Image (cartoon, rainbow, N blue to C red):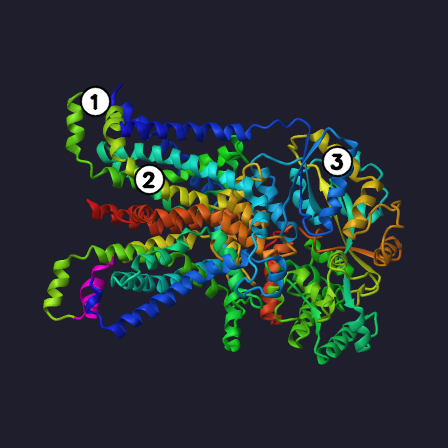
Amino acid sequence: MKKSVQIAFFLLPAVVLVGIFVYYFAGWSAWASMMKWEGLSGFGDFVGLQNYIHLFTDDFVFRKGLTNTLILSGAFILVTLPLGLLNAILIDLGLKGKKAFRLIFLLPLSFSFVVSATMWVWMFAPKTGTINTILRGIGLGALTQPWLTSSSQSLLGLVIIYVWQFSGFATLVYFAGISSVRTELLEAAEVDGATTFQKYLRVVIPLQKIPTFTVLFLLLMYALRVFDLVWLTTGGGPGYSSELLATYMWRVAFNRNQFADGAAIGFVMFVLSALIVIPFVAKMRGDSR
Amino acid sequence: MNYKQLSVPVQIGIYIVLLALSLFYLLPIYSLINTSLKSEQELVSAPVSPVKNPTFSAYKDAFGKINKSFLNSLIMALSATALSSIFGCMSGYIFSKYKFRGSNVLFFLIIVGFYIAPQSILIPLVRFIGSLGLYNTLFGLILTHTAYGMPITTLLFYNYIDPIPHSLIEIAQIDGASVFNIFTRIILPLSLPGFAVVGIFQFTNIWNEFLFGLTLTSGVASQPVTVAVANLKGTTVAAWNVHMAGAFISIAPVLLIYIFFLRLVIKGLLLGSIKE
Amino acid sequence: MKSKNLLLLLVFTLSIAILVPSAVVSAADDDKLVVYHWWTAGGEKEAIDAVFDLYNTVYPDIEIAENPVSGGGGGIMRSKIKTMIMAGNAPDTFQITYGSGMLESWVSVLQPIDDIWDELPVPEKIKEMGTIDGHQYGIPLNIMRNNCLWYNKDLVEELGIEIPLTSWDELYAACKKAKEAGYIPYAVGAGSGQEFWLASQIFQSFVLSAPHGGPAYLEKLYNGQANPSEDKAIREALGAIKHMIGEGYINSDYAALTWDKAADLLVSDKAVFYQMGDWAKGHLTAVGWKSGVDFNYQPSPGTEGVFSLHLDCFVFPQGAPHPTSAKKWLHLLRTAEAETVFCPIKGATPPRLDAFTDMYDVISQDILKDFRDPETTIVESAFAGPPEAWLDVFGRMFSSFFENPDVDQGVKNFANAYKSLNW
């Protein structure tokens, strides 16, 4: 058999599957988002960008979903990056039990969002929830909060859940980054009389650009796409307070039968993820050459 | 680094921080297990306090409700993991060892697929799987998870296979070995440890997935365990102990993998995110 | 050789991967009836099971594949059906609420069943509600009254509140008394994805009784012919709700409670009034209360003589895989026997005018009397009068309003939400 035929055969599954399930579908969504498609019956006329114009100018819930998505992503990343770095440094200090702590920090990553959602709804329940009950139990009843059931705290609650779920991943990447710092650099710093604290501050942390970059982009991806965790905790509420693009897409399409709008929101998400990911993958591939 | 340079008070301080952090990570998990072990009466009388008379009755209830879905998930995750791993090994091998015109672009286009938000392809996916007659079948889910696994398995195997020296391939080629022969004789045996890493990565991801399970199934015949657990939350009587027990059963396989194969888990996560 | 063994193992796993699913999938399905419904709670589950039993008695050869999907007032089940239809996998029959807007939202994927409907002996209004372009699409199984205000009889007596309350002023006065005595005057539960109660129960009862509101306005509103930013009724209803919230008549944890938990506040003597459709009776009796003894209902204040109605029905989708079984099912549902088996257990009332009435309790008898009284004004409820999207759109809108009861902003949001339904 010719070499090129064999090569084609080896690439066939990946190319066909990704071609259909990613690119054909994304193209289909883009096309559907430019049709009139309301109700269960199927397509109407071609309307061009009208659905997008409607979303961006007319639909304040869509805009709310977009800003909420950005706020949530921003807050989540601002907390997770330093926390992940802190965790990694604490593990790196090499105290006894470091393996156990590493497992503990990583454990939330193993939980499906469905299970995380279940747990956190229970944790945050205003009357019978773990957090408020503990607060009352230690005499801090004044600090109890309505958490996910109030529109001013629902996003905060989601940020806490996201941080819980994903900071282990940041820890992991930072830990790998810290471990790869060359010992000569540290020894040199030590010769200069640097304390442990100064060694981290002056040598280790400045070398964490690539891990930071990696964590930042992967977390952004997750923040954009996570659906189940939000859908099963706040459902986007109360009011519109925690509506995200991912939940609004589902709501518009499957609760309200406005399928073209749903496809349009889906395509907006596609563009957003492409904007995040293409520079990232390009840079990562570039660095490895 | 070396902790001996740290004074004892500092060490104690660090432990306090570590324990506080652990509390943050473990409290929800403790809460989950604690609730799942309660009887209905104890749940009503003392929902949060530590369980006094642990019982497995909630587990029995929950298992009766999700056992079929658990099996579905097992078949689905194992099959899709196996298929996407072998396909990913094939394409990762080609992208690493045979450069052709456009191969870099093709490789880029494939791995970018990993990062696509699933919402953006949800509607066509449902229609497509339906048109193949695979709606509400395990086959449909396996196909879908295999497809969306391709980008990451390709990348992981590429990263795994790339360090295998090209000279090995060249020698084999001089001996007249075909692309296929080199794959079975050199690449596959050398990347077998890679299968463990990729397999674990894929299995945990697929096992935990919810949205495809929600949209591509309509009943117990094929519904994965994540969807079954979400359904345990009834409308009226909130049987939280059963819900929590079901939740715990549903993550048990992944939890065990994390506890016993943490090294491989970490390797997969790192290989998937950065270059080694 | 070690690597060969591993290779064998891999091939083995792969073949299992391919063979097992196909074995699991292929099950014979000759005489089957695939049904979707959302009755999973105590009472309603037993009720629909009784109808399945009846079907099995008449057609012992047909196997019922029942798929209960709870949550969201049927919304979760309806989303599921949409993905099924999108995938070309319609069931044989499914439950939806019966009314002009809901049926209109679904009609493009349904088959007319005029031959089965035939001369169903129900009030003309019901026939009208279900007629889309001259055809019938759903067989109603039970009727539901929405405008019911439930009350704890002991507490009402203790507080010296005179029932029935017939105006907003009387409602406010009663709530004031209850509040001063330390009770929750007006229990609301709309958490955990149940925001739609705020629109379908609270708002609807206030707009029905608003000075410029009433049944005729509600009909206009649900048909897409209202102009919410100008209509006085909307502003009045929002103002009344704002008053209820502002005076502290509504429990502040409404967003953390499901509807049944709010009903339980009545049972535990914590709350006095509770606005909910007549299915609340099923829940209250299920937890041990006696109809007419421990609790009772009155029409929501200011809605006397009005019957806010929706029904549950089953429909016949296009592409139903077992059409014969489906038709048999619908034929069975239209009988007085099916209604008689279903309604008493569910705590509901039968739509057929010739259905027996002896087996119903005092409250159901009373509801039935109002329903059959030609003087009663029947008006469609939020569950099926407006298009399907109404509950989701306005559930969100009112969830936002309850958090921040600003009438001007509320009217604006209402008008926006109204427009988003693309009438």
Q: Quadrant of residue B133?
A: top right
Cβ atoms under marks 3 and 1 closer than 8 Å: no
Q: Nearer the viewer, mark 3 or mark 2?
A: 2
Tell whether A186 sits left or right of B28. left
- Dot 1 falls on a residue whose secondary structure is loop
Q: Nearer the viewer, mark 1 or mark 2?
A: 2
| Number of residues whose C-alpha sits closer than 10 Å to that of mark 2, classed few (under 14), some (14–19) or many (20 or more) | some
Residue furthest to the bottom: C180
> Disc 1 to disc 2, how far (Cα)?
27 Å
| Number of residues whose C-alpha sits closer than 10 Å to that of mark 1, classed few (under 14), some (14–19) or many (20 or more) | some
Q: Where does residue A193 sit, x and y in percent of width and height?
A: 12, 71
- Dot 2 falls on a residue whose secondary structure is helix
The rendered magenta stretch, by its main secondary structure, is classed as: helix
Magenta stretch in the rendered image? A195-209
Work out whether residue A186 or residue A244 is closer to the camera in this orientation and state it.
A186
Location of mark 3 (residue): C329
Q: Quadrant of the N terminus of chain B?
A: bottom left
Work out whether residue C124 or residue C244 is closer to the camera in this orientation and state it.
C244
Q: Chain of mark 1?
A: B
Task: Name the residue type under label 2.
Answer: Ala
Q: Is residue C414 visible?
A: no
N-terminal-most mark, 1 or 2: 1
Which mark is drawn over residue B196?
2
Q: Where does residue C335 sit, x and y in percent of width and height?
A: 83, 39
Q: Chain of mark 2?
A: B
Tell whether B212 sits left or right of C262. left
Which mark is drawn over residue B177?
1
